[in-house]
Image: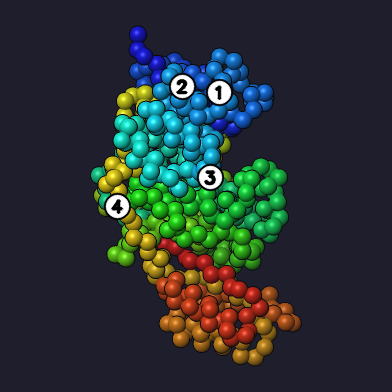
Amino acid sequence: MTTPLRLGIAGLGTVGVGVVKIVRQKANLLAQRSGRPVVISAVSARSRDKDRSVNLDAYAWEDDPVALAQRDDVDVFVELMGGHEGAARLATEAALAAGKDVVTANKALLAHHGQSLAETAEAKGCVIRFEAAVAGGIPVIKALTEGLAGNDITRVMGVMNGTCNYILTRMQDAGLPYDQVFAEAEALGYLEADPNLDVGGIDAGHKLALLASIAFGTRVDFAGVELEGIQRIAIEDIHQAAELGYRIKLLGVAQMTGRGLEQRMSPCLVPEESPLGQLKGGTNMVVIEGDAVEQVVLRGPGAGEGPTASAVMGDVMDIARGLRISTFGIPARELAEAKVAQSNSPAPYYLHLTLEDRPGALAKIATVLGENGISIDRMRQTRHSDTNAPVLIVTHKTQRAALDTAVEAMRATGVMVNDPVALRIETV
């Protein structure tokens, strides 16, 4: 009889319960597709008594996930607890030390400790799989490590946080201000316990750092990701972008340049008719560009019980079939130390300024831009009041460093009412 693959699942929230359901409901299909039964030996969670809408009586229970990771009847430790320290890290390290393979949905753990965990896994002959950590149900990790392995990847970009995409598209469709839509998202349970993980771009930045490591053969460098959240996007910016033929998205971009690895997660304007511009609600999208394949667009649900559990099971099935791949596509010790490069690729920018309504104010701003080598493509005033003059400027292509210098000089003119909103206009 074929030996079953035995799972130990740590974390029985939405995703963990989804994995249990798939294993129970599709046992025959999983066995047919992998060539061996896939079963659950034991589980662990914070509370044994919580109603999870699924019967767990058939499985051994461990209060301590480290003990679960060390059980003799567990072949694959499935880590679905979250967090980059504490129980998740300790249990994952314990599983690897005990010679267990690991499947995880924990992007924070790998963004902060991926290199050391990968080295440990490979030294022990284990694998770490993390499809569910990036873009929910979209098989982007598999695409990069397997389907596109014959390509030199030139750029990876995408919308990787469903909550931010929900907020921005809700603002767009309903004409509602950021604060109101943020409150809606919080009431619906879309936000993390710490909302800044979502709206501050941190969650999506973790995902981008993981994709960049695989795409460019570099050590995971979350600290090198330039982060800017969506908190300062006003409904006026949404409307103005639409009038220009754009949509605002929290967009992650990673590319290798002659100066080093650029990684940025920031709100950008993208063309309304582009695949990214058409992306609605909590859906994610990742665009991969390679020298042989040119461009591949992957779109799908970025979160939720079914999509994320599906990604977890995809990794489990690969292990069941005997597929062994280095954590980040090549052996961890061969990953290069990425040289951090600040994003300096020229692009047009959208500037939303509020100036004091007095003679010469706009002329001072135009002078500052000119002195920094930034030319104006379009400019208009909007919703003029007795004291303030909102101004919209679209620049010709310039470098972000030049724009940042210009913004500092604008502050010194004394005509600025508040800090400007400066958004890159991205070619996709």
Q: Which mark is residue 71?
A: 2
| Quadrant of the image occupied by residue 21 | top right
Q: Quick check: 238 above or below 156?
A: below
Q: Tell me the mark number nearer the camera, choosing from 4 and 1.
A: 1
Q: Quadrant of the N terminus?
A: top left
Q: Reading the chain from its start, which is encountered first: label 1 or label 3?
A: 1
Q: Please say if the residues under marks 4 and 1 sit with CB atoms less than 8 Å apart.
A: no
Reading the image, the residue beneath label 3 is 283
Dot 1 or dot 2, earlier in sequence: 1
Observer-nearest of 298 and 198: 198
Q: Are marks 4 and 2 in contact (CB under 8 Å)?
A: no
Looking at the image, is mark 4 or mark 2 earlier in the sequence?
A: 2
| Badge 1 vs badge 2, beta-carbon distance below 8 Å | yes
Can you identify the residue that label 4 sits on? 336
Secondary structure under badge 3?
strand
Type of amino acid at the residue the image marks with label 2: Arg
Residue 282 in the image: above or below residue 28: below
In this picture, residue 108 sits left or right of residue 120 = right
Residue type at the position of mark 3: Thr
Is 145 or 396 nearer to us in this picture? 145
Kindly identify the residue that appears in the image at 61 percent across and 45 percent down.
Answer: 192
